[in-house]
Structures are given as C-alpha cells and as structure tokens.
Image (spheres, coloured by chain):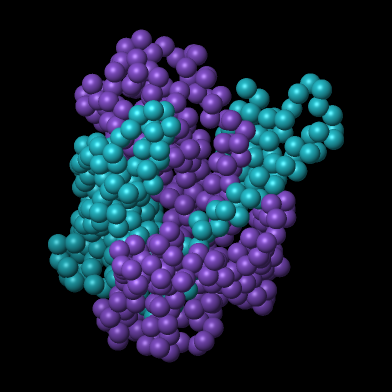
Amino acid sequence: MITLAHAYIVAGAFFAAMSLLSMQDRSNRRRIANALFWGMLAISFLAGQSLGDLANGVLALGLVAVATAGLGQGQARTTSTEERRESAQRRGNALFLPALIIPAVALGGTLIAKETAWGRLLIDPAQATLVSLILGALIAVLVAMIWLRPPVAAPFQEARRLLDAVGWAAILPQMLASLGAVFLAAGVGGQVGRLFGEYIPLDTATMAVAVYCVGMALFTVVMGNAFAAFPVMTAAVGLPVVVNHFGGNPATVCAIGMLAGFCGTLMTPMAANFNVVPANLLELPDRKSALNGVIRAQIPTALPLLLVNIVLMRALAF
Amino acid sequence: MLVLLGIGVVILGFVLRANPLLVVMAAALTTGLAAAWTPQADLQAMTDAALSTLSAFGRAFNDNRYVSLVWCVLLAIGLLERAGLQERARALISTVKAATVGRVLWVYLVTRQVSAALGLTSLGGHPQMVRPLVAPMAEGAAETRFGALPDRERYLVRAHAAAADNIGLFFGEDIFIAIASILLIKGFLEQNGVTVEPLEVSVWAIPTAIAALAIHSVRLALLDVRLNRRLGARTRAANAAEAAP
C-alpha cells in the first residue's frame, strides 16, 4: 500500500535534488544558502520521523536562520521564449493533457482509495488525496518525458527555476501550522476569548452577531487560518452569547461564522499558501509587501462579503 | 495574559517587514517563554521552557510536512512550461473572440466553486492550475484585445487569477459535507454538548456561497471595465495611427 511515508521519500529526494542543483549553479552568488535550505528540508522529509522533537525544532531553526540570511535566485537551464512559442505551435492543445493528469489522478486516486476494496489496498485511504497528488505529478512527469524527450535533468532544472521563484515562502505555510500548535498548547485562544468577553458590549443579538463575525475575520487575519480562530471565537462569543443567550441555531451560527473567518483569510499575508505563495509563483513585483497584489485584489470582495455574512447570520439563525 | 505577547510579535513583525519565517519562530519562542514565566523563574527554568517550546515546534513542524508536499508538482509543471504550456494557453484563448479577462476568470471561478462544493478541492490550486494555465489564459485574453500589456495591468490580471482560485475554493468547499471545516464545526459542537449532522451545517454555507459568487462576478465585470478604460483608449489610438496614411 502506498502511504504518506512514501510520498515523503519522494519529496525528500525532490528537495535533495534541488539542493544539489543549487550547489552547482555558479551564476547564483548565494548558492550555498540555497543548497543548505533545500538540503535541510530534504533531511526533514527523509529522516524527520526518526530525528526526535528537539532535533526537528533545531532543523526548523536552521531553516529560519538560512532564510533570514537570504536565499539567492539561480539561473536554471531552460528554453527561450522563441523555442517555447515554436513548441507550443507544433504540439498544439495536446500540451494540456499532461497538466490535467495531475488533478485527474489526484481525484481518481482519492475516489478509488475511498470507494473501492482494491483501491484501499493500493493507496492509504486516510491520506488518499495527498498520495494521489504525488502519484499524479510523477505520472505527468513520466508522460511528458516520454513524449517531449527533454534532457534527463530537465524536470529538476525546471522545478528549481520555479521553486527559486517561490523561495523560502515554500515552507511558510508549514511554519504557520507549527506556530498554531504552539499557540494552542500555551492557551492563547482562551485568553483572546476572555478579552473579547470582558471588554465588548453584547447587549443585542445584532451586536453579538456582528462582534462574532468581525472577531472571526480579525482573529483569522492575525492567525492566518480560520480553523485556528474558530474554536477561540466560538467559545468566547458564538456559543455563550449568540447561541445560548440570544437563541441562535448553532449549526447556522457556526457555518456562517466559519465563512466570516474565510473573509479574513482573503485579507492576510499570514495565510501564506493562499496569498503569499501565488504572489511568488506569479512573480508579482510587490510579493514581499504585507498587502501584495493578490490580497489587494481580494479585499474589495472580502469586506462586502463579511457584511453579507453578518446580515445572513442575523436573518437566518434566529 | 502574557501569552498574548506572541500575537504582538506577529503583528510587530509584519509592521517592521521582518522575514516572516523569523517572525513565526520568534512568536513561537515568545509564547512558550511567556507561558512559563513567573516572577520566581530563574535562567535554568527559562532555558528549559525555550527548549521545550522548540521541541513542541519541531514536533508540529514534522507532523505538518504534508503541507509542503505540493511542491513536487513543480517537476511536471516546469517541464510542460519548458515545452510552451503557457504560450499554448494564451494562444488557445486568443482564438476565442468573446474572451475577456473578466469572463475567463469568471468561468474559472464558477468551475472552481462548483467543483469544490462537490468535494473536488484538488481540481485547482496555484501551482497546478493558476500559474501554468489560468493566469496565462487571462493575460492572453487581455493581449488579444489590447496588445502587449504594461506591467501594471499584467500584474493586476495575474493577481486576479490567484484571487479567483481562492474565492472559488473558500466559498465552495464548505458546501461539501466531508470537508475539514465542516468536520471541525461538528467536532467542536459535540465537545460542547450540541450534536449536529454535517449536512445541517453545510446547507448554511449555500447563502454565503451565492453571495460570494455574486459579489465577485461584479468585481470581475468591473475589472473588464477598468482594463477597457485604461488600455482601450491606447489601443484605439494605436489602431487609428496605423490606419492613417
């Protein structure tokens, strides 16, 4: 059975290759830093489960240190714009097929693992989507290699070109998830809830609904994740005040409260995988600023939608 | 109250524009130290607290490795970009006469939202779909209409391609009953003595989903208006200059 452990080995080998290729790239003046960064990430994927907690913490600290010192951007060997145009012309729309293999296998693999008896033996159903995503990527590479016949190192060189554009932001989502765990252990959520409960007047149902929804959005902006904000704000305001005191329907209140949190996710650089990673991938010039182009494109949708959520909760939950 | 210092570190870090990885690590250590601090604590106790926080962070970092797995898809995407995938996406859209930036992104928004509502959240994403296909298609639609794009408009179009993916995903996925957020709500309510069926929760995501689609559709229409105003005049002037003897 293919499990997450196998996917981690693939990812470990992938990051190790990124490290080696970075090391060899003499055009990058900070190539040692790049090689160290991807090398440490490779160690985390290949050996993280047997390293022990403190060693993993030191590894994360090392990644932070190298990233803070600064990564460089390499010059991966790739094709020119002219060559690409010519190739696009010659190969036509068939070029889309390998790209669609990835979502197709991710989806098909998930369904097979969850719905069929033999699929369960092939792919770990508990991690079906992640395992299938990696399988899809590998199959797509295989198909593209056989069809396009590029140099053998091409997939790695091309991946390095893209990964260098993302840079250290590649591990920001994983780091934020870890910060969430530390916050949870220290009881940060409970404290925030107490503050809200003590200092904000919640005399009317409308006021309580507004405070709960805006609080979900604001706390999500700080934490970068509505899942982290939800238990805190719902325990502080949602359940005791909106549901128990004013008699709101708990399913409606929680569902719309979560979506109010998602409005916050649209507005924060802390939601790295949604807002920072695409800015890097799309090479936006303002990708390093707190309000990058992606977030600015989203705020005018997020704010009216937050207001709509408040109105909807007030209208539907009582 | 001291444990809230960690949140302060996060906000301060963003205000000072420090490296976000450094901010995250500093916030974690601050939180761990603040939780352990008492007026009687000596250096030894604080060192222990720092080490145990680093261990907790390391355990969580290791448990969350799956978050960074997605980068492996760059092997395939990079290879196809090398063979002209983005150029092909642009060329395909330029053959569709009715295509505008707003319409291309609207079709993607609807597809993303509907597929997410059916639980197919893996049918999109920034590395897999936005960078190789959606952004080039949107740029291609703009180029067909207005010619080569100035940088400001090019990046505006790309940012909107990423936004369409996020908004479609966020306000579609909650309609599906077996998505993480719905299960989190169910679990949270159960701990607090309220039993709900996932379906009871997910149907209440539908009104917001409709509102999100309506609001963002208007925004995409306005994006077309804005691009027309900024670039349309320029293109018409260029065409007129060409037509003049």
Residue drawn at point x = 79 percent, y = 21 percent: B39
Residue B8 position (above or below residue B215): above
Residue drawn at point x = 75 percent, y = 40 percent: B50
Residue B93 position (above or below residue A244): below
Asked if residue B225 shows in the view, the reply is no
Specify the quadrant of the image occupied by residue A84.
bottom left
Residue A94 position (above or below residue A124): below
Tell whether A24 sits left or right of B188.
Answer: right
Q: Colour of chain A?
A: purple
Residue that extends furthest to the left in the rendered view of this protein: B98
Residue drawn at point x = 36 percent, y = 70 percent: A119
Residue A292 pos. (x, y %): 46, 46
Q: Colour of chain B?
A: cyan
Specify the quadrant of the image occupied by residue A128.
bottom left
Where is the N terminus of chain B found, in terms of image quarters? top right
Residue B29 pos. (x, y %): 69, 39
Residue drawn at point x = 33 percent, y = 68 percent: A117
Residue B228 position (above or below residue B184): below
Asked if residue A39 shows in the view, the reply is yes
